[in-house]
Image (cartoon, helix red, strand yellow):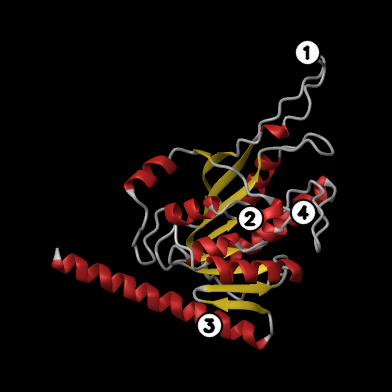
Amino acid sequence: MIAKAIQTKKQLSKTEEDNSKIFEMLVRNFKNNKKIILSHKKSLLLNGDVLKENFFDKEYFDLIITSPPYNVDIKYNSHNDDLTYDEYLEFSEIWIRNCFKWAKNQGRFCLNIPLDKNKGGQKSVGADLTTIAQKVGWKYHSTIIWNEGNISKRTAWGSWLSATAPYVIAPVELIVVLYKGEWKKNNGSKISDITKKEFMEWTNGLWTFNGESKKRIGHPAPFPLELPYRCIKLFSFVDDIVFDPFAGSGTTLIAANNTNRYSVGLEIDLKYCELAKQRILKETEILF
């Protein structure tokens, strides 16, 4: 038992050293070009555009968690969320390919997207973005169904009591789980902090918890802290590097910091960068 404990400690120390060096290198690199909004504890928040292929120069990230724009005409400050569907798919392919390029081998990708959408016509968003992810190199592992309990999304029945044109709308979102190279993860600290109860509950791929309040957070499309918290504990080791290319209000970085992971967030809008900065400074003192 003592030998095993010493070996575990060595594994953790080596990973801490490796990822600490990577994190410090990122801080130095981006300090030079003035992209850093915040470097705090194990969190690095950057102002930049995920569509720029050379924003990062190599593979850095163990786990990517993000919820991209859904193209449902949300009024963001710096993004047009009302593209044609073909334009939206082109936009999605670029940023998903960039994330693949920046992920380490055995890196995981938790992609929070809608199952489908009916604004501007019925579109199979979940299926289409999953197909694009596989096209650029990601491999498919599974899909988690997130039930927000939001029945207000039920907007129309179509033809009342008729088979003429009924609409079926599922009030759920997806978390598509993808990976690069191999699914079995044999790099990193190999130190998990997930409890048996959490593992048993979360490996059931139907998750039920509430969404986040736009008004409370001050962002038009925040996701709840519970979402990245579960993904981080289930799909990464302690001291892994977690990345969110649409950092928004900083939720992923907060969850990563509070579970003892390094994190990097990329956000194009300076107003949201400031919002994320203030949330990270305030909420990284709070442990789950």
Of marks 4 and 2, the one in the foreground:
4
- In this rendering, the label closer to the viewer, 4 or 1: 1
The quarter holding residue 51 reads bottom right
**Image position, residue 202 (x, y; %):** 44, 43
Q: Which residue is mark 4?
A: 90
Amino acid type at circle 1 is Ala
Q: Which mark is residue 27?
A: none
Neighbours of disc 3 within 10 Å: few (<14), some (14-19), many (20+): few
* Mark toward the start of the polypeptide (1 vs 3): 3
Residue 136's mark? 2
Query: Which mark is nearer the camera, 3 or 2?
Result: 3
Going by the numbered disc 4, the residue's amino acid type is Glu
Q: Given this view, does label 4 or label 3 mark the residue nearer the observer?
A: 3
Q: Sequence-wise, which precedes: disc 2 or disc 1? A: 2
The alpha-carbon separation of the residues under discs 4 and 2 comes to 12 Å
What's the residue at 48%, 57% (across, down)? 181
Lower position in the chain sequence, tag 3 or tag 2? 3
- The residue at which mark 3 appears reads as 25
Q: Are the residues flagged by discs 1 and 3 in contact, CB closer than 8 Å?
A: no
Q: In the image, what residue occupies the spot 59% across and 55% down?
A: 137
Q: Whole-percent x and y of residue 41?
A: 50, 76
For marks 4 and 3 on the same chain, the one whose residue lies earlier in the sequence: 3
Label 1 sits on residue:
163
Element marked by disc 2? loop
Q: Nearer the viewer, residue 274 or 87?
A: 274
Rounded to the nearest angstrom, the CA distance separating label 2 from label 1 is: 40 Å
Q: Quadrant of the N terminus?
A: bottom left
Identify the secondary structure beneath mark 1: loop
Q: Amino acid at mark 2?
A: Val
Cα separation between marks 4 and 3: 32 Å
